Image (tube, rainbow, N blue to C red):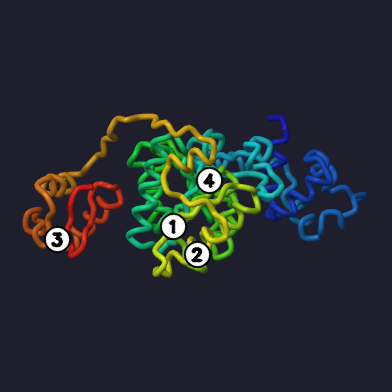
Amino acid sequence: MEFGLQHIYYWLGISGITSRRANILLEKFSPYELWEKTGNSLIDRSAFGEKAYDALLRFRSEEFIFRSMDKLDSLGISFITYDEFPEKMQQRETDPPVMLYYRGDVSLLKSDCAAIVGTRACSPYGKDAAKRLANDLSERGVTIVSGLATGIDTYAHRAVLAAGGKTIAVLGSGLDCISPLSNSELGREIIDKGGLVVSEYAPRTVATKYTFPERNRIISAISSGVIVVEAGLKSGALITADFALEQNRTLFAVPGNITSIKSVGSNRLLYEGAVPALTADDICETLGFSSRKISEKPIAIQLDIFEQKIYNILRSGETSFDELVVKAELIPPKLSAMLSAMEIKGLIVKKQSNIFCLA
């Protein structure tokens, strides 16, 4: 196998040097020059930085690189390098990684993308707003990008899948170490249904308090616009908003309840000039996307035997939790879990006083 540009970018990626350091080096040297000069006793190591040079030298082996790529194949993980990124991801302002690991349909990186982000501890209003915008945008052919975290991210990804659309999840960990663990199944479902899961971190990399904020720049880099649904003053979604502004992406925010601490950050973004995110059509028009629905056909959702039983009961009208326990013949913990799953899928709605009805 001929050793080429893709392998050099892979070498830069696995060396462990930061993307910022790699980009600085690539401004001074071509990729091939980096490969040739590393290990050359005549090179001025100060141009690299001691730690970066030592890291590059440690992994400078064609045999090791080919062996590592074979290992990725065995894990079902592929990668795309900087030279293959869409133009919007190559901007210097995005501090682009030299490579991204992925599972799924990598061509989605070149589609019309919009990010939906927000707090993990969202309110019912935030949940409904995320689901509505994700559903409506995906019906218009927009690929929804988010971070596979709990809360707003999860509801956005789930709504897209329920609508038969496409979604991209950007991880703050390796592809085989999804965090939170509770969303591992969601990650697999995204891939199985034609979506994409990406990460700049190598397999076996565990998420940390540093990797989550760092990956947010990639969420905005992939997207033409970033929609903050709900965010408190210290929400990580505001970090993504900052990246969006630095990268010259359009920043949207969903107007929130002025008495809710969960909306303080997102409402502040509106005060500072973010575009109000009111409808999918408005967002598409602002981003220059087509607002025409790509399909008017209802999406068929597969139900298991218990979900179908609950669904049939609710077809008769609003029903309380206690009534469902009796009619569905399920113990309360089991019923509660089933109702939560159906709510996430967008099948049912929970109203006040533990009353449920079909969505």
Task: Tell me the residue at 13%/49% (across/down).
Answer: 314
Q: Residues within 10 Å of mark 2 (few under 14, many from 20)?
A: many
- Contact between labelled residues 1 and 2, with CB atoms less than 8 Å apart: no
Kindly report which numbered mark, 3 or 1, lies closer to the viewer in this rendering: 1
Q: Which residue is mark 4?
A: 198
Q: Which mark is residue 265?
A: 2
Q: What amino acid is found at the position of numbered circle 2 in the picture?
A: Gly
Kindly report which numbered mark, 2 or 1, lies closer to the viewer in this rendering: 1
Kindly report which numbered mark, 3 or 4, lies closer to the viewer in this rendering: 3
Determine whether the residue tagged by mark 3 lies in a helix, strand or loop.
Answer: helix
Marks 3 and 4 sit apart, C-alpha to C-alpha, by: 39 Å
Marks 3 and 1 sit apart, C-alpha to C-alpha, by: 32 Å
Residue 147 in the image, given as x and y percentages of width and height: 48, 52
Residue 126 in the image, given as x and y percentages of width and height: 38, 58
Kindly report which numbered mark, 3 or 2, lies closer to the viewer in this rendering: 2
Which of the marked residues, 2 or 1, is nearer the chain's N terminus? 1
Residue 331 in the image, given as x and y percentages of width and height: 13, 61
Rendered view: 249 above or below 340: above
Task: Say whether residue 22 is left or right of residue 212.
Answer: right
- Which image quarter is the N terminus in? top right
Q: What amino acid is found at the position of numbered circle 1 in the picture?
A: Pro
- Contact between labelled residues 4 and 1, with CB atoms less than 8 Å apart: no
Q: What amino acid is found at the position of numbered circle 4 in the picture?
A: Val
Task: Say whether residue 121 is left or right of residue 215.
Answer: left
Which of the marked residues, 4 or 2, is nearer the chain's N terminus? 4
Marks 1 and 4 sit apart, C-alpha to C-alpha, by: 30 Å
Residue 26 in the image, given as x and y percentages of width and height: 78, 45
Question: Of residues 339 and 276, which is closer to you in this image?
Answer: 276
Does the rendering let one see residue 280? yes
- Contact between labelled residues 4 and 3, with CB atoms less than 8 Å apart: no
Q: Which mark is residue 321?
A: 3
